[in-house]
Image: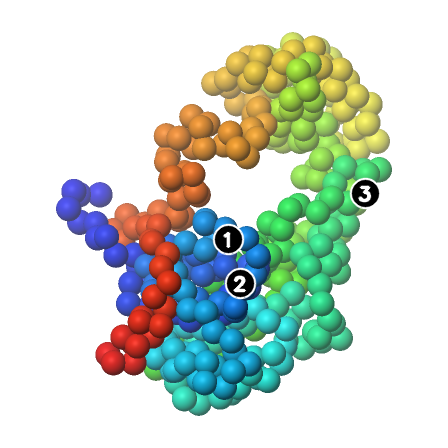
Amino acid sequence: MPMGTETTQGPLSGIRVIEFSGIGPIPHCGMMLSDLGAEVVTIDRPGGYGPRNDALERGRAVLTLDLHDAAEAKLAADGAVHADVLIEGYRPGVMERLGLGPEELCALNPRLIYGRLTGWGQDGTLAATVGHDINYLAITGALAALGRPGDPPSPPLNLVGDYGGGSMLLLVGILAALVEREKSGRGQVIDAAIVDGVSSMLAMFASVPIKREESVLGGAAPFYRTYECADGKFVALGAIEDKFWAAFVDRAGIGGDWPRYDASLWPEQSAELEALFRTKAASEWAALFEGSDACVTELVELSDAPAHPQLAARRTYAGGQPAPAPRLSRTPAAIRPRSDNGRAVIARWMDG
């Protein structure tokens, strides 16, 4: 990119967002919108939602309101009337009971994009039921597919549900609605459900049900799983394709012919590789395979990830926080400061 063509404003500069604070996917979506240049006012409740998270909560102007107080709820509504986007993650009906539902606010601001994010969705047999990431994954088939054969299914932190199927799905809906509004001049309501987003991410497996004992990508295959090494640390082996497996075999010094896609042989083959990897420390294996196409990588603890040479070279972390992503050549995203002047920001919106 030619020097001097970039701007310090992100691609969403000028977009105004009201975020009703919560936990999990809503603050992640708000973080992404702020990083991309939107001006985000977070409506927080007295006492907040627990300990502060400097990364997830960055880039907001915060306004603490008791939404059960009519005057304070009116201030939140005033912000929405002058906003482009609203995001909330309460159970269905909560915003309506506060007088802040989409019917009321979209009537006052027809250009408003009203983003709703829940686990089960706005309708259905479980819509009014509480739940968490693990519960949403449970009914989609995703959780049953996770984990090694013979072990209980393992929840993947809250990455697949809250963030992958939740905040990122809501973000896609918001960006699509902003593009459409340029043509129609009208906003719309987004019903983003984690169960929908996770199901969408399972599209690759929709026609081929996953059996964990036969799952190449789930850790059953000996050539796509983690192995413990002599020092108690782990390496990841991802040699799926034949040429990558050949590179692994060559450097590992494995002899004989391996019929790799006969799942009945995978337990025996895995045991052989388990014994092999226990003969060296993880760093020794990493050094042995460095520069090869064997797809062997030493596992890094999260606390050590920022210092990994690849992440350090790309500046994937900034000031101890994940840097904004993705990277745009002309209107790059940026980490923006957090403040407590949400009231002043809404007043400026109303004046302008």
Element type where label 2 sits in the image: loop
Quadrant of the image for the C terminus?
bottom left
Q: Is residue 73 left or right of residue 60?
A: right
Q: How many marks?
A: 3
The residue wearing badge 1 is 52
Looking at the image, which residue is at 73% across and 59% down?
A: 135
Residue at the front extreme, as displayed = 47
The residue wearing badge 2 is 48
Q: Position of residue 15 (x, y in %)?
A: 33, 68
Q: Position of residue 183 (x, y in %)?
A: 34, 78
Which amino acid lies under the numbered mark 1 shown in the image of this protein? Answer: Arg
Looking at the image, which residue is at 65% across and 11% down?
A: 280
Which amino acid lies under the numbered mark 3 shown in the image of this protein? Answer: Pro
Element type where label 3 sits in the image: loop
The residue wearing badge 3 is 152
Looking at the image, which residue is at 37% across and 36% down?
A: 315
Position above or below: 69 against 305 = below
N-term-proximal mark, 3 vs 2: 2
Mark nearer the viewer, 1 or 3:
1
Q: Position of residue 262 (x, y in %)?
A: 79, 31
Residue 186 visible (yes or no): no
User: Could you tell me how far apart the alpha carbons at marks 3 and 2 are, in whole angstroms?
Assistant: 35 Å
Q: Residues within 10 Å of mark 1 (few under 14, many from 20)?
A: few
Q: Position of residue 174 (x, y in %)?
A: 45, 68
